[in-house]
Image (cartoon, rainbow, N blue to C red):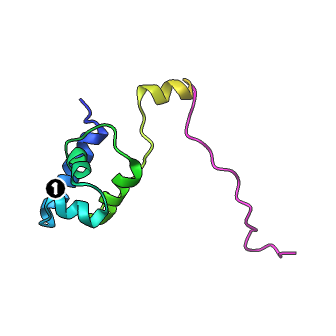
Amino acid sequence: MTERVADVMAAEVRSRRGQLGLTQQDLADMAGVSERFVRFVEQGKPSVQLDSLTAVLETLGLELRLATRTSHAARSLSGPDAGPAESPPSKSANPGEARP
């Protein structure tokens, strides 16, 4: 079964904080959030404020990235015949063409 995003993030934050030798209170002070907030992040609580979360991640030298993943829901939204999206044609001039 796939791990929840909050659980993966919780493990990464705990691990990185430990690597840096920080207590939850140290991290909270450095990130400008409460120790309780850090504890909630590390417990994988599902509802945390994004701005506070990014402050914690930035303090630890971590970043939150979004990536496209194929899931049943995504496939059903795309339709059965949907293929990869095509990029629009380039507007750059060919190297041999003169520019106006």
User: Residue 85 lies in magenta, yes or no?
Assistant: yes
Residue in the image at 74% along x and 61% along y = 91
83 versus 79 height, above or below: below
User: Residue 88 lies in magenta, yes or no?
Assistant: yes
Residue in the image at 80% along x and 72% along y = 97
Left or right: residue 50 versus residue 84 is left
Instruction: Work out whether residue 61 can be spotted.
Output: no
Could you tell me residue 63's position as x and y percent?
Answer: 35, 58
Q: Which residue is mark 1?
A: 15
Which quadrant would the N terminus be assigned to in this image? top left
Which quadrant would the C terminus be assigned to in this image? bottom right
Left or right: residue 14 versus residue 92 is left
Assign a secondary structure to mark 1: helix
32 versus 89 height, above or below: below
Residue in the image at 28% along x and 36% along y = 4
Number of residue marks: 1
Q: As rendered, which of 40 and 100 lies closer to the eye? A: 40
Instruction: Work out whether residue 29 can be spotted.
Output: yes
Q: As rendered, which of 99 and 10 lies closer to the eye? A: 10
Bounds of the magenta span?
81-100
Could you tell me residue 87's position as x and y percent?
Answer: 63, 49
Residue in the image at 76% along x and 74% along y = 96
